[in-house]
Image: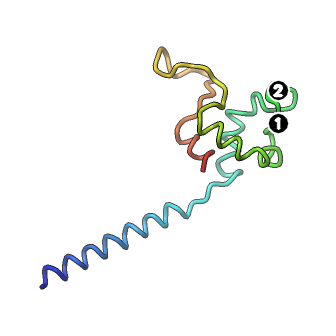
Amino acid sequence: MNTVRSLVTLLCSASALALSMTAQAQDHEITYNGEVAKIINENCVICHREGGIGPMQFETYEQVRPWAPLIQLRVANREMPAYAYDQHIGIQDLQGDWRMAQEEIETIVA
């Protein structure tokens, strides 16, 4: 009986710890000024600026916000930034490389 009680206590404690850790991880809310703007500026504004080749500008929050769903979709599908480069062949660490790291993609898509 003590073994069952100990096992139940252990499982409840583990569950509470897991829930606590999940809640802490979700406490961090991704914001435009906190994370997204830096990624957009480093990877998108080169084309999406006044006079750039991109069809819309992404220099301010007001310019980015209406396009957020499309940006998320295109980034998630790795269609943007537009960068035709085989990541399995040749040198990978290029200066001025616009490819997004997986962490940046996850931030934009979140």
Hey, what amino acid is under mark 2? Gly
Q: Dot 2: few (<14), some (14–19), or many (≥20) neighbours within 10 Å?
A: few
Residue 62 rendering spot, x and y as whole percentages? 83, 48
Q: Is residue 66 left or right of residue 27?
A: right
Q: Which labelled disc corresponds to residue 52?
A: 2
Hey, what amino acid is under mark 1? Gln
Which residue is at a point 49% across and 67% down the rendered structure image? 23
Q: Which labelled disc corresponds to residue 68?
A: none
Which corner quadrant holds the N terminus? bottom left
Q: Dot 1: few (<14), some (14–19), or many (≥20) neighbours within 10 Å?
A: many
Residue furthest bottom in the image: 1
Residue 27 rendering spot, x and y as whole percentages? 55, 64
Q: Going from the N terminus, do you reach mark 1 or mark 2 first?
A: 2
User: What element does badge 2 sit on?
Assistant: loop
Q: Is residue 12 left or right of residue 109?
A: left
Which residue is at a point 67% across and 46% down the rendered structure image? 36
Task: Residue under label 1, please give it.
Answer: 57
Q: Is residue 2 left or right of residue 52?
A: left
User: What element does badge 1 sit on?
Assistant: loop
Residue 99 rendering spot, x and y as whole percentages? 59, 29
Residues at circles 1 and 2 in contact by the CB criterion of under 8 Å = yes
User: Between marks 1 and 2, how big is the CA–CA gap?
Assistant: 8 Å
Q: Is residue 80 above or below residue 87?
A: below
Where, by quadrant of the figure, is residue 38 drawn?
top right
